[in-house]
Amino acid sequence: MNVYDSGRMADVLAPEGYVSTDAVDDADLVILNTCHIREKAAEKVYSELGRIRDAKADGTMIAVAGCVAQAEGDEIMRRAPYVDIVVGPQSYHRLPKLIAEANPTQKAGSRSRVIDTDFPAESKFDFLPAAETQGPSVFLTIQEGCDKFCAFCVVPYTRGAEFSRPVEAVLKEARQLVAAGAAEITLLGQNVNAYHGDDDGLAGLIRKLADIDGLERLRYTTSHPRDMNQDLIAVHGEVPELMPYLHLPIQSGSDAILARMNRKHGAAEYLKIIDALRLARPDIALSSDFIVGHPGETDADFEATMALIKTVEYAQAYSFKYSKRPGTPASDMDDQVPEQVMSDRLAALQGLLNEQQLAFNEGAVGVSVPVLFERRGKLANQIAGRSPYMQSVHVTCRDAEEADQYFGQTMPVRITGAFANSLAGTLDDGTTAETTQREPARA
Ligand code: 5AD
Ligand code: SF4
């Protein structure tokens, strides 16, 4: 979502005459967009700010945006006296006004320092200009905030209460993005499947979006098991534009830990959803988030997580050591897990997940998959994109001209090699018989 927000900040500043630059020393304004989800991310802000201060030109203004700005605005102003503006994730539509207030024509030191971490009554989305497309595959925020209050998580405090954009606004932005060249849209929200801007929820929105001419692919992230209703599961079997991939975090496989996490679901309930999804869309690839070492997690709890992973067989996943976040209920729980135990558990868990990911990727070798080419590869004449299952696929073209020709196109690719994090392939000329990706065992 920070990628999307950063793009929108650029959109809001474009009418003011700002253009993007990658060079800090070339910038009139540097905005550091920040993440507060784990301690490491938040701590990085201060070292990064120091680097920006050293690299920037004399008159350059510095703004800090995002969830660290929201949670620690005053602290940032105190620890980094050279920061001019602090702006939270719900008020960045006010950036032009905040910049004017800070008075950029004044020398650093005599400028005003401004901080805006309100949750304004108005929605920023009503004030943002039309989104500029960034390429063939783009993000679109449809929902923000969260009312779930998992015991470990800062999101309900930094992003605020759950909010859904009205369906008409989402459709309008989607049409603009497609008209500007997007072939794939990933719908974003901290709790995206709780979307209620359409009478039929996220399922209703997906059906409407799928009707947009030129929109080839749809995805959505991140979902909560609690909001994975029957209609949404059915959409996975009905709407061909909805890609066969779902990121559905469970966090832990232990009911005792899920209860302490205040997740409002158990492991069996989650597995039932997985089964229903695989019934609706047998080839669906699954992904999850896992936290190891949540307060109270015993060896047996951890083994329950490992067992669940073996049952589900993930195509990919993200995993983290529990990170104590100030102000969250879990940070006050008394049975915190020692660092070394967390490290050992994370290594074991990631070992298993990596094995599953490689096995999933190897299942694609020899198969022809449609790839939407959305990036240049690292090597000469290489283009890269994603399979329907979210795998990164690299293809080396004959020459630069061929690479240009296929950029932004969806092309069949015959997979020739599988690695832990990507696939290699060749453009499929249609001479080999079509096969399909191996279907995983049902949970
Ligand atoms: N510690 C570790 N991981 C966390 N996440 C959220 N809060 C924490 C925390 N305090 C993880 C969860 C969530 C993902 C976005 O980040 O797994 O799904
Ligand atoms: Fe955080 Fe997700 Fe739980 Fe909401 S549902 S509190 S965003 S982990």
Image (tube, rainbow, N blue to C red):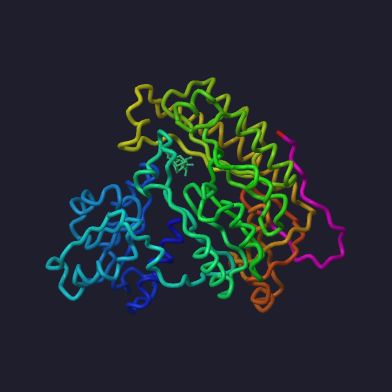
Is 336 drawn above or below residue 228 in the view shown? Answer: above
Q: Which of 392 and 420 is in front in this view?
A: 392
Q: In which quarter of the image is residue 336?
A: top left
Is 279 drawn above or below residue 133 in the view shown? Answer: above
Relative placement, left or right, of 344 versus 403 is left
Assess whether residue 415 is covered by the magenta stretch.
no
Residue 289 drawn at (x, y percent): 53, 40
Relative placement, left or right, of 137 versus 328 is right
Number of marks:
0
Residue 84 drawn at (x, y percent): 22, 63
Report the image quarter containing ligand 2: top left
Residue positioned 66% across, 73% down in the render: 403
Residue 262 drawn at (x, y percent): 45, 31
Question: Looking at the image, which residue sits at the far left?
Answer: 110
Q: Nearer the viewer, residue 201 or 112?
A: 201
Q: Nearer the viewer, residue 323 or 330?
A: 330
User: Magenta residues?
Assistant: 423-442
Is 353 drawn above or below residue 366 in the view shown? Answer: above
Question: Looking at the image, which residue sits at the far front?
Answer: 199
Q: Nearer the viewer, residue 433 or 279?
A: 279
Residue 389 drawn at (x, y percent): 67, 52
- Tell me the quadrant of the picture where the C terminus can be found: top right
Assess whether residue 435 is covered by the magenta stretch.
yes
Relative placement, left or right, of 134 versus 418 is left
Residue positioned 63% across, 47% down in the render: 232
State whether the magenta stretch is mostly helix, strand or loop: loop
